[in-house]
Image (tube, rainbow, N blue to C red):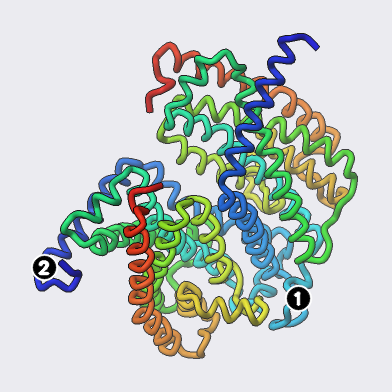
Amino acid sequence: MGSAARNYLNAFWAMARKELIVMARYPVNFVASFGQVFLIVAIFTLGGSTFFPRESATGTQVDAGFSSAAAGVAVYGFILFLFLSDTLWAIGYNVRNEQLQGTLEQLYLSPASKFASLVARVTNTLLWTGLVSIAGAALMAFMIGRLPFENPGLGLYLLVMSLSGTFGIGFAFAALTLRIKGTAETMANLLQFAFLVVCANFFPFSALPAVLRAVSRVIPLAYAVDAFRSTLMGYPPGFPELASIEVEIVVVTVFGLLMPLLGYWLYRLAEDQARHSGGLSTY
Amino acid sequence: MTIFSPAWRKYPSIVLASARMRLINISRYPGQLVVDIVIPIVFAAMPILLGRATAGPSAGEVFKQNTGTDNYVAYMLIGSSAFTIVSYAFWHIANWLRWEQETGTLEALYLTPTHRIWVAAGTAVYSCLRGVLSSVVAYLLGSAILGVNPFQGDILIAFLFILVGLVPLYSMTLLFGAVILKVKEANSLINVMQWGVSFLMGVFFPIAFFPPVFRAAALLFPPTWMTNGVRASLLGVGYFFGEWYFDFAVLWVFLLVAPFFGYWLFSRVELNLRRNEGVGQF
């Protein structure tokens, strides 16, 4: 391994470690984020179960009729939403935090790799959100009885590609954060909810009005959601909804390979402009 | 000076000044006001669209068997609007305390001759206005988008439930404020709290879905009565005690007890922190 690559890996490891240490120092935050996911899963499971006949109106069995297809749609969509949401905040909004704390300019004056700095933030997201997703899915499976789990190999491939593309969106959002500064928090909220609707994370695409479905068809992340959950559900009738699975795999692969490059390019562009205009440390 | 000083006339002006300052501040972020309205609609749309897509044409019928009304759109919109009021109450009060602490003005605020309870009341007035207005607009707009009539049932009684429910709700935020002063990790605690509250008050489902222990806990919680009161008066899902005035009486009990309990606990934590150099520390 060349010395440049070794330096890069060392920088990446140091930054990832620093992020993990910071995370470990806030145990309340740590536990709270876990509890929050459990509560969201419970709320949506119970909300969804109001549409299914129950065995007993007062029984403790929560949702006897909550179909496994409905559960698959909501759980697997929710997992991708968790990653998207965390990525927007962890990468994009973290850059804003560095700016507010006054450490962003210093970071850029150091010889350390900027790419490693961005990717290190993703590492935490991967680890923590991954654990939270598994726990959330397990809870939902426990509440509804059975969660479909077919084609795990292809499902994993689609997840990796989807996450890669999602991280690209995070890089692009970090670029936007450098430009819009204080509005970034509102924008992250808006983007999160916009994606939640057009990517149909909690419901099938067939539930969307035709206009919104047309919007979904031009968003690669929507194909990622559709392909990922359809694959893990074993392609029940009507799934995937946006295109054939072959086409969706191609879209997700291209999204996973190109989006990080595009996002990083946009980030470097915004960063160059901020450095030339002296905007890195102003907020 | 105590909060029961005879010079009571100045207190409303402190409350209004505090509320006005915050309203001026938020008026500078119009994007945030749009998000305030969009979030409850999107939030309610999730279970609505999932239900429509998976339960098909019988969605309303099955929903009625489970909840007492086939108008699931209004049911979910009321839940998410109530969620907005409740979560804003927690966010605004707790964030206000934490923000003052972080910017170093909390200690200074404690040293002014104005009692902080009036400044807190101003923040609560601002929060009420923002939360209730956002919720009402979101409910009306969401009803228009999703094709239901928002003006049904007894609107006046629904408003009464909201108005009376706001007092115990904001008293609860004082309890939570005490926790924030003590633990100091506002964001993560508020995040959990808002989902915990939504869960207990049955944001998208009747609390009859809960096992008995959870149901009992939910009934000790004022927002549960407020949300069910609004749903029962607008959609006829049924009051917990059969008639609206019985449920309303329970909410009044909360209204009379919660402010004193909230203030008492907050004062104790606060006193403890002041004695241990904790107000200015973060």
Question: Residue A129, position in %: x, y?
Answer: 68, 44
Q: Is residue B53 left or right of residue B203?
A: right
**Which chain is disc 2 placed on?**
B
Task: Name the amino acid, label 1.
Answer: Gln
In this figure, which residue is indicated by the disc labeled 1?
Answer: A61
Q: Quadrant of residue B66?
A: bottom right
Relative vertical location of residue B66 with respect to residue B146 in this rendering, above or below: below
In the rendering, which numbered label is found on residue B88? none
Q: Quadrant of residue A199?
A: top right
In this view, the mark in front (2 or 1): 2
Seen from the viewer's position, the closer of residues A108 and A7 is A7
Q: Residues within 10 Å of mark 1 (few under 14, many from 20)?
A: some
Task: Name the amino acid, label 2.
Answer: Arg
Is residue B224 in view from this perspective? yes
Q: Quadrant of the N terminus of chain B?
A: bottom left
In the rendering, which numbered label is found on residue B9? 2
Q: Residues within 10 Å of mark 2 (few under 14, many from 20)?
A: few
